[in-house]
Image (spheres, rainbow, N blue to C red):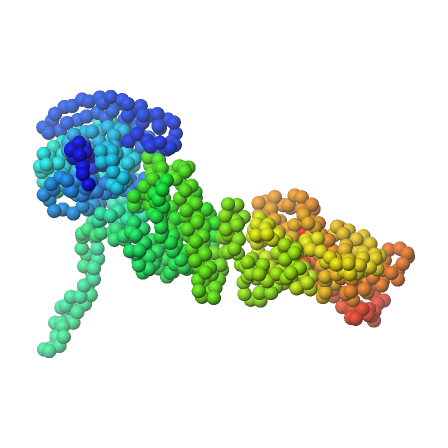
């Protein structure tokens, strides 16, 4: 690479730090007052007063700098922990510059770029030291004393190179130190040949309005680089704890490529001779040893984890992917089920690794959208920015873990708020597509579907939510759905398998039938399953409230309409002339019973109809085409109660129950004979008969998924019939010996809620 003399001149004068804010990048939104204040200061002329006291020079900050400093300290950052991220990022920039300049400018030292952090409780200071490019006196004045000046930005502009990725382009990172310090000192030795033997110290206090630059003895800093000393506030003493510093570095700066070390006290256990035990040691005996704790103080490197997403996927082994997953996401006992490593190029550049966990993460087992679950970690040039961006990944992919690192994301000056942008939308789409590819990979695994069943049992509910919430991807998610069915036994089936097993008649219908219920066993009992089984139709079982919402949102799969078999008119049971004639004849024969049932059950059902498809059940309760299933009615009612609103408004309009009766069942035949025998004698007042009619509805409602509104009354009604020895067998009704007991039994039945 050939560098022009002008570029070299710009490089050697570039600051090591993005200490002062550059003009804000286009697209960054911030309150107008902040933007106007900083623009005003950026245009302001420097007001300088200098008094020489030995080698010390005192300067005033630019006009209104106090106001801008107040904005920086109190407005730009929502969490003062980020000061360490900013200062370490600046130090990494300085190291990167020195490494790059070493290619073109002679550097006689053999120091390797590194960053050290020294917390000192005695002096109440925190020192961040690097072996980077360093600062001259002029650079201190230019870059630390003037708001709206960024050495890093100037460096990149001089380089005009897309390959040099430096972190500190935001400008105000240095001043974040005042979030925790009331005084800051910067001691620096520049690698510039003409200034290498000079050491300068920049000093300022929070809201002080001025700063000083002092020439220091050469031994103030022994190497080329910079040392920042933070004199901490009284309420910031926790930043002197090495454990606190370590946790922040692991969070924000874990993948900085230069070594970051923290000075700390370490306890090591060593084997030493046990003098007391060896006092009476006989000749020839082995000396006895004991383990003693030895406390040592020194620097310990923290960022040993390498950012494997920056490497080519062909260079990373499966073991490295797994090791990174376990370390980055604290999943020591969980091997990922699938992973993808890719580079996004074109309009925006980004690198990413995504994982599907081997098991449901603990925090998601309590709440599938737990706020404390951070699934995607966003980095900008290896510096952690945030893991709370909901726009980066839809919540129905909350279970996917991963890392995204991009140089092109627009952030605000606090590096905290990711603005709405085209870049973000592009990354979002790519992450979703890659996540779906991982699901397909698991689905197509050559293990008889065992891997996918494990995935579905852990994460299937998230895909259902995706269909409900994300119309753009619902057709992509539909093939991944799995259900039990009337023909699948204990195995899952998919919509595609369902279509493969269609009968010729069902193919003409262009319908996929399903029934809803609470739990698999109850759903199997639905009379609607019985009706379809008679036609050899397969029925899918929707056993959760989410299933019904999801399937209604999907509504169609390929050319087939998803149809609730428990709805009135879901399918024609009288397509051919024979069936149609049989139904008409049965309706005519049962007309008196139908009229009686509609009158007696008028508060419970909208109408009574004959069904030719019921075989074992005497009756079934179905909802009208626009009615709400019993499962959904209960779910909506519970939601309403949970919100403190009492009953659900408009429930009556949602309840359009229809009672279907089986004309060939003995119970229906027996009830019909009693109604006909009564003729025109007026209403039937026999309490036993009325209880039987109510029980007919109760049983039909219960098997269709509804609940008995008063179980005690229902049980009393059943016991009353038993005590009267009333049985129905082969259409023969036998009166009990206690028929003289004509106490009327309270008629309380199952309600369709």
Q: Is residue 706 above or below residue 111?
A: below
Q: Could you say which is closer to the camera, residue 407 or residue 74?
A: 407
Q: Quadrant of residue 8?
A: top left
Residue 362 visible in the current orientation = no
Q: What residue sits 80% from the left and 57% below the top?
A: 584
x, y percent for residue 285: 13, 77
Q: What residue sits 72% from the left and 61% below the top?
A: 613
In the image as oriented, which residue stretches furthest toward the right?
Answer: 681
Q: Is residue 521 above or below residue 653?
A: below
Left or right, 234 with reference to 434: left
x, y percent for residue 171: 28, 34
Q: How many marks?
A: 0
Q: What residue sits 64% from the left and 60% below the top?
A: 504
Q: What residue sits 85% from the left and 63% below the top?
A: 673
Which quadrant would the N terminus be assigned to in this image?
top left
Q: Quadrant of residue 269?
A: bottom left
Left or right, 302 with reference to 332: left
Q: Could you say which is closer to the camera, residue 63 or residue 380?
A: 380
x, y percent for residue 604: 74, 52
Q: Could you say which is closer to the camera, residue 9 or residue 454?
A: 9
x, y percent for residue 515: 63, 57
Q: Quadrant of residue 164?
A: top left
Residue 102 visible in the current orientation = yes
């Amino acid at each position: 690479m050939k560098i022009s003399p002008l570029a070299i001149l710009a490089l050697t004068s570039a600051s090591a730090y993005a200490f002062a804010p550059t003009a804000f990048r286009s697209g960054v939104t911030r309150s107008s007052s902040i933007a106007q204040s900083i623009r005003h200061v950026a245009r302001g002329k420097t007001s300088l007063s200098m008094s020489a006291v030995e080698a010390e020079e005192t300067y005033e900050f630019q006009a209104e700098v106090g106001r801008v400093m107040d904005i920086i300290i109190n407005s730009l950052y929502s969490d003062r922990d980020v000061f360490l991220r900013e200062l370490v990022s600046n130090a990494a920039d300085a190291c990167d510059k020195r490494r790059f300049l070493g290619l073109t400018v002679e550097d006689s030292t053999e120091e390797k770029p590194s960053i050290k952090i020294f917390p000192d409780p005695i002096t109440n200071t925190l020192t961040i030291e690097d072996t980077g490019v360093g600062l001259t006196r002029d650079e201190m004045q230019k870059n630390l004393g003037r708001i709206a000046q960024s050495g890093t930005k100037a460096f990149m502009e001089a380089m005009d190179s897309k390959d040099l990725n430096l972190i500190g382009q935001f400008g105000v990172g240095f001043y974040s130190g005042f979030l925790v310090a009331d005084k800051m000192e910067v001691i620096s030795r520049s690698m510039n040949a003409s200034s290498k033997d000079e050491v300068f110290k920049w000093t300022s206090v929070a809201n002080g309005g001025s700063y000083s630059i002092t020439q220091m003895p050469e031994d103030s800093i022994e190497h080329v680089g910079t040392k920042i000393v933070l004199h901490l506030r009284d309420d910031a003493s926790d930043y002197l704890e090495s454990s606190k510093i370590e946790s922040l570095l692991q969070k924000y700066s874990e993948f900085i490529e230069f070594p970051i070390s923290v000075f700390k006290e370490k306890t090591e256990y060593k084997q030493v001779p046990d003098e007391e035990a060896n006092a009476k040691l006989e000749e020839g005996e082995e000396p006895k040893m004991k383990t003693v704790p030895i406390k040592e103080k020194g620097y310990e490197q923290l960022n040993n984890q390498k950012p494997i997403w920056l490497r080519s996927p062909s260079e990373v082994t499966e073991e490295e992917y797994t090791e990174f997953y376990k370390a980055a996401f604290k999943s020591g006992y969980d091997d990922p089920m699938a992973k993808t490593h890719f580079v996004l190029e074109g309009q925006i550049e980004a690198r990413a690794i995504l994982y599907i966990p081997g098991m449901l993460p603990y925090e998601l087992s309590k709440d599938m959208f737990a706020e404390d679950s951070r699934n995607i970690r966003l980095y900008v040039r290896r510096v952690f920015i945030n893991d709370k961006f909901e726009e980066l990944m839809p919540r129905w992919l909350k279970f996917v873990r991963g890392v995204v690192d991009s140089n092109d994301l627009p952030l605000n000056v606090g590096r905290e708020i990711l603005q709405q942008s085209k870049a973000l939308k592009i990354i979002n789409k790519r992450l979703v597509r890659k996540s779906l590819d991982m699901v397909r990979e698991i689905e197509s695994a050559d293990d008889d579907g065992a891997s996918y069943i494990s995935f579905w049992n852990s994460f299937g509910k998230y895909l259902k939510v995706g269909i409900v919430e994300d119309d753009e991807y619902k057709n992509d998610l539909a093939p991944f759905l799995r259900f039990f069915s009337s023909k699948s036994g204990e195995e899952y089936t998919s919509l595609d398998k369902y279509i493969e097993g269609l009968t010729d008649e069902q193919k003409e219908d262009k319908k996929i039938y399903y029934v809803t219920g609470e739990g698999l066993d109850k759903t199997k009992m639905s009379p609607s399953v019985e009706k379809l089984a008679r036609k050899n139709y397969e029925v899918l079982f929707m056993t959760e409230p989410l299933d019904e919402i999801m399937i209604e949102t999907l509504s169609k799969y390929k050319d087939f309409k998803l149809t609730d078999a428990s709805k009135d008119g879901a399918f024609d049971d009288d397509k051919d002339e024979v069936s149609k004639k049989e139904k008409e004849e049965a309706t005519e024969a049962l007309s008196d019973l139908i009229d009686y049932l509609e009158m007696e059950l008028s508060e419970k059902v909208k109408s009574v109809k004959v069904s030719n498809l019921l075989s074992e059940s005497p009756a079934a309760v179905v909802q009208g085409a626009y009615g709400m299933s019993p499962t959904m009615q209960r779910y909506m009612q519970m939601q309403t109660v949970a919100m403190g609103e009492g009953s659900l408004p408009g429930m009556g309009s949602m309840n359009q129950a229809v009672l279907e009766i089986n004309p060939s069942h003995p119970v229906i035949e027996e009830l019909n004979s009693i109604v006909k025998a009564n003729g025109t004698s007026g209403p039937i007042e026999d309490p036993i008969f009325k209880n039987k009619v109510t029980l007919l509805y109760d049983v039909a409602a219960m098997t269709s998924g509804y609940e008995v509104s008063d179980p005690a009354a229902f049980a009393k009604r059943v016991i009353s019939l038993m005590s009267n020895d009333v049985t129905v067998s082969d259409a023969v009704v036998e009166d009990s010996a206690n028929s003289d007991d004509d106490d009327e039994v309270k008629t309380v039945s199952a309600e369709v809620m």
